[in-house]
Amino acid sequence: MDDKQEQKFHQLTETPVGPLICRLALPCILSMLVTSFYNMADTFFVGMLKNDSITGAVGVVFSLMAIIQAVGFFFGHGSGNFISRELGKQNFDEASNMAATGFFSALTAGLLICILGQIFLKPLATLLGSTPTILPYSTAYLRIILIGAPWMTASLVLNNQLRFQGSAAYGMVGIISGAILNIGLDPLLIFVFDMGIAGAAWATIFSQFVSFCLLLVGCSRGGNLRIRISRVQLKWAYFKRIIQGGLPSLGRQGLASVATICLNRAAGPYGDAAIAAMSVVQRIMMFGASTMIGFGQGFQPVCGFNYGAKLYKRVRDGFWFCVKTSTVFLLAVSILGFAFAPQLIALFRDSPEVITFGSTALRFQCITFCFQGWTVMSTMMLQTMGRTVPATFLAMARQGIFFIPLVWILSCTLGFLGVQMTQAVSDALTLVCAIPIQLKVLRELAATEP
């Protein structure tokens, strides 16, 4: 163990929990906010083309990007959770082996997504929810996005591994640099070079590549684990750990993609404006949740290191600190979102129909938004501790187990109003499940403290 790694270990296991989480969370929050902002950039600039079909196409392809992200988070969280626990135990060789195995596995998976996606491009675009009028735009956008799949998945692994080592600042530099580049390239390629929706796609994958390169450099600095191909372990024991740690993320992100497809299909009968509206609402809510998620990401390395070191009281204290802080913040955001829903929708698309559809959906989601503090922090804690089954269930519940059947049931019984209120109902049901699951784990930790 070198001096920087030893210093990091003592910092994560001895510094007061509240200030430590806040300091680690700051770069995570900034990264999440900027990532959400540039996820919305394509929607924002494409919306200026004044075409509901083009705006809808970005929303349709977003579900495929969610699949790419699901793969990246699977390997990133799967390897990262293991790395943080092993660093807490001071097993640095095992942590280094896992870092390389997770990275190269994600790179290979991204390459497979790229190849298969290009082969089945039109069927894939249709499956994602493209209507006949949206299909030409969605295939043009999708064809280019797929090219970047390998480095998109690998970037998420690098960012998460850095974060779980307590070095989120290095990840922040890579993410923010790529985001700023994307925001600058979008208007340049879309309007100046008149590339339309294809320009938005090229801006996205080029900026993601720059992020990838900067994240790779970050792994060689500050006592972080270096990525070496010689460290790759093609052994079941490592992949089993990745599956255990990454399954909740794969379930959450994968089902989020399926949920988006179902949402697009449920909204489809009400026209392209309905699909565009729900796409805008998804982006706004993701932006609103970014601070809370980033805050929880600051908790995860604290949780992993201290759980590995058997300092369970610090784990519990960190959880309660995060829940209280995030719930107060989300409540404030919900009130503002409810009050200014039409204005927020109009920022992305000034179509009266889109604003009407989107405002109602946004207000429904604001009603239950503050519930996510408990649900997300519980999922993150369980996942970091290696509690795969309950973590996977909670991760899949909000946008999968509850959302997918609800969007069909409510749309059939209440029409488009049912589509608009589905996420709020799903959030409430997820909270009902999350409370007893997490309380049981907290009691177990209290009972086993050394």
Image: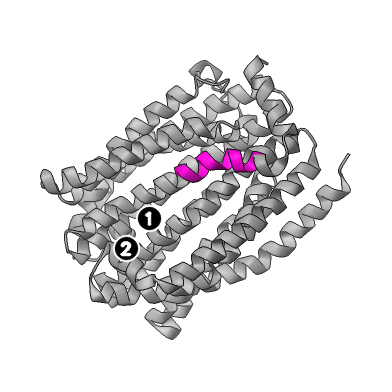
User: Residue 383 location, x and y as percent?
Assistant: 64, 46
Reading the image, the residue beneath label 1 is 63
Mark 2–mark 1 distance (CA, rounded to whole Å): 9 Å
Which quadrant holds the N terminus?
top right
Q: Determine whether, in the image, residue 398 is placed left or right of residue 15.
A: left
When asked about the image quadrant of residue 123, the answer is: bottom left
Asked if marks 2 and 1 touch (Cβ < 8 Å), the reply is: yes
Residue type marked 2: Gly
Q: Magenta segment, which residues?
A: 20-31
Please name the residue that numbered disc 2 is placed on: 129
Residue 175 is tagged as none
Specify the farthest residue to the bottom: 413
Give the main secondary structure, helix, strand or loop, of the magenta stretch: helix
Tell which of 180 and 365 is nearer to you. Answer: 180
- Name the one closer to the observer, 332 or 31: 332
Q: Is residue 179 left or right of residue 69?
A: left
- Residue 28: within the magenta? yes
**Visible residue check, residue 132:** no
Instruction: Report whether residue 25 is seen.
Output: yes
Question: Looking at the image, is mark 2 or mark 1 nearer the viewer?
Answer: 1
Residue density around tag 2, few if under 14, some if 14–19, many if 20 or more, within 10 Å: many
Give the quarter of the image for residue 203. top left
Picture coordinates of residue 250 (x, y %)? 52, 48
Q: Does the magenta stretch include residue 141?
A: no
Q: Residue at x 37, y 50 (%)?
A: 37
